Amino acid sequence: MPVVNPLARELVFKIVYYGPGLGGKTTTLQYVHANTKAEHRGKMVSLATPVDRTLYFDFLPIRVPNVRGLAVRLQLFTVPGQVYYNATRKLVLTGADGVVMVVDSQRPRFDADLESLDNLRNNLREHGRSLEEIPYVIQYNKRDLGDVVPIDELEAKLNRHGAPSFATVALRGDGVFEALEAIARAVLDDFERRMPEQRRAAGQALELPEEGLAEALRRADSSGARPVAAPTSAVAEDQLALAVAAGAEPAATPAAVDRSPRREASPPSPGVAPAPYRPRAETFPGPVGAPEELPSERPRAGPRFSALWPATEQDTVRELETALARAEFESVVALCDQLVSRVLASAATLLGSTADAPRDPATVAMLLGLDGPRYLRFRALLRESRGGRAISANEALAAYAFVIQARLSRNEL
């Protein structure tokens, strides 16, 4: 379901572009970004591999002009096309209000299209949803190339539910805005159907601008706008960076992104990767009743992990480390949850304006470059701890290590 802010009279819908690798998902978002008026678009964020293939996802917020007095924001996401990153696909699908399936029309890619469609069905099923009930649109992309499968054949094998479909050429923008308008109308209609009857009767029907979404969003000079080049990145897969696109120009490389004004006021980092946590008797209080060491006999304390956090959160970190030393592992996990939640909330604000920032924690975690399966394991551990399961020392240490990694990633923004 969309995020509803009744005070600001604002709706936020999440739309996910799904499909095989190199099928045109990222190119579609790049064209929308390049040809949308500056006042209606946010920053485009991409996480890509060194060979320009989307590793995690792309994110583009779009502000739809006044919809019957309501501000409507569309948060557009892509998923990685490679099956290897299926855990990330599942995370990106979390809370999706609509899906656009981007099909590669080339005949040699038809098997990849079928595999991606089956994968979409399976991942939706794990979220308790299905293609029959979720707003859904298909783009038959790359129609300008040779050896493409005829539309009739694609419809028969890939569109058994009769979803709205469009022949597109993402590089030129053919059909791109039409597909975006169709999915926007579908999510608005779906939202209206789910509204309580009394609220629906009291308000006006939600409709897109009379001139159509494409005309309302397009740049005045869109006819001459250049297609946006695919994002380039020279970082290794284990050191992802955010590439932020600006206007119609190609996406900036991580080296070109100015992060200086965004850093949060905090004590300086130790400057080295944190070592595995090892409790020390001279650092943490011992068991109740144990004799205290004399100050003169206590070794000098070295750098502490709490230095990674702003001063307002350092007490929580010290409390967590004390709980570790006392083997209070359930408390450790609960404090880890607090620290991670604060990191993700802080990062969401930096990754876009407050209104445009992604709302779900899983999305922000991926924007920070955190490992998707590791994040899922962390969330599962939290659920099990709340359910009363005893937490082991190794699990508590792993949770704290994840918190430290999240904080280091946040400090790099």
Image: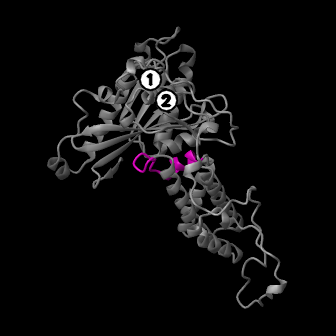
Q: Is residue 305 magenta?
A: no
Position of 305 relative to 247 (above/below): below
Q: Is residue 367 magenta?
A: yes
Label 2, label 1: how many angstroms apart (C-alpha)? 8 Å
- Closest to the observer: 266 or 396? 266
Horizontal and vertical percent position of residue 371: 63, 47
- Closest to the observer: 51 or 19? 51
> Which dot marks residue 284?
none
Name the quadrant containing residue 266: bottom right
Q: Secondary structure at mark 1?
A: helix
**Which region shows up in magenta?**
353-368
Which residue: 74% across, 59% down? 274
Check disc 2 and report the residue beneath it: 117
> Which dot marks residue 158?
1
- Disc 1 packing (10 Å; few <14; some 14–19; many ≥20): some
Which residue: 53% across, 67% down? 386
- Closest to the observer: 71 or 400? 71
Which residue: 83% across, 86% down? 296
For residue 316, say whether it is visible: yes
**Which of the two labelled residues, at mark 2 and mark 1, occupies the earlier sequence position?**
2
Horizontal and vertical percent position of residue 341: 52, 60
Which residue is at the far top? 146
Q: Secondary structure at mark 2?
A: helix
Q: Amino acid at mark 2?
A: Leu
- Disc 2 packing (10 Å; few <14; some 14–19; many ≥20): many
**Horizontal arrangement in the rendering, residue 75 relative to residue 215 (left or right):** right
**Horizontal arrangement in the rendering, residue 136 relative to residue 264 (left or right):** left
